[in-house]
Amino acid sequence: MKKAGWVLTAALLLSGCQQMDGAEKDKQTETQEKNKAEKPADQPQEKEAAAGLKLEAAFFNEIKQVNGKAVITNPENMMVLVNKEFSLPGDYTPPDLVRPKVPFSFGEQDIEKSHMRKEAAGALEKMFAAAKQEQIDLFAVSGYRSYKRQVEIMNNQIAKVGTFEKAAQAVAPPGQSEHQTGLTMDISAESVQFDLLQAFETTKEGQWLANNAHKYGFILRYPKGKENVTKYMYEPWHFRYIGIKAAEEIYKHGWTLEEYFDHVQKI
């Protein structure tokens, strides 16, 4: 994750991973059931709306414990849930990375961060074209980020702030960045000098994305007011592809991806 232009004064906590017994359900299912049990009972309309929400088992994380971390073993899943609890393997590289045909803040350079997985890249092209028709000029800033690059970013941040714990308040620990999935793009505009700032939310470009990205299969991955759920600060520039059907459900209910998996039934 790229550090925001505004300084965040409140520290966000890292999520721990518990050792898993072989006879137990996978860690993600346990977390979902725990969260469901803690939901307040005075929300009948939301529960009724989500009652029929179902998702094939292939779209849920499959997890194994590696050195005390919950590591995802099916990372090519288009709805993979990557966060401070579920990590990608260090050697994972998406197999179908391409460079989407959209404007980039750094021009025509064909570099690592200009790539996305093929399906997500196609959806990004459609979204940018739709925005352009409404006189909204979007610019892609940062897509795929390898594990090696995540390590470099983390080491640079540690050098600045002194400890891993402090560094992890601003950037994702290696393996826990959605950028490694190839399904994420940071997006900006000339109105904010192509930077990644929370002020992006006040621009016409940021507002268009917040209100329309779901139509093309993208979600605002780290929304304002959900920092306690995502464990990341608000990032109005960070959009994650999950497909139109799930994106529309998340937009309609105001959920995060974590909350979507709390509500959806595995089939």
Image (spheres, grey):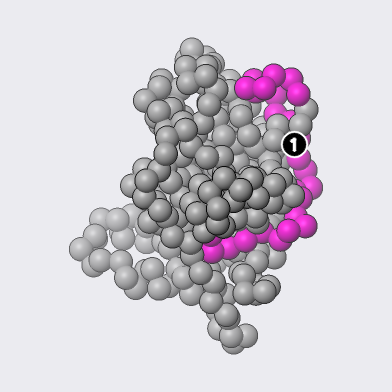
Asked whether, in this view, residue 154 is left or right of residue 5, the answer is right
Instruction: Please report the residue visible at 61 percent of the width from the left and 69 percent of the height from the top.
Output: 70
Q: Quadrant of the C terminus?
A: bottom right
- As rendered, which of 267 and 16 lies closer to the eye? 16
- Which element type, helix, strand or loop, lies under badge 1? helix
User: Is there any visible trace of residue 164 in the rendered image?
Assistant: yes
Residue underneath mark 1? 112
- As rendered, which of 178 and 4 lies closer to the eye? 4
Residue 12 in which image quadrant: bottom left
Instruction: Please report the residue visible at 50 percent of the width from the left and 54 percent of the height from the top.
Output: 166
Query: Does the magenta run of residues contain 67?
Result: no
Query: Does residue 69 lie above or below 241 as drawn?
Result: below
- Residue 187 in the image: state x and y as whole percent: 55, 30
> Mostly what secondary structure, the magenta segment?
loop
- Residue 266 in the image: state x and y as whole percent: 52, 66
- As rendered, which of 71 and 164 lies closer to the eye? 164
Q: Which residues are magenta?
A: 80-109
Q: Residue type at mark 1? A: Glu
- Residue 21 in the image: state x and y as whole percent: 58, 85
Q: Quadrant of the N terminus?
A: top right
Instruction: Please report the residue visible at 69 percent of the width from the left and 43 percent of the height from the top.
Output: 145
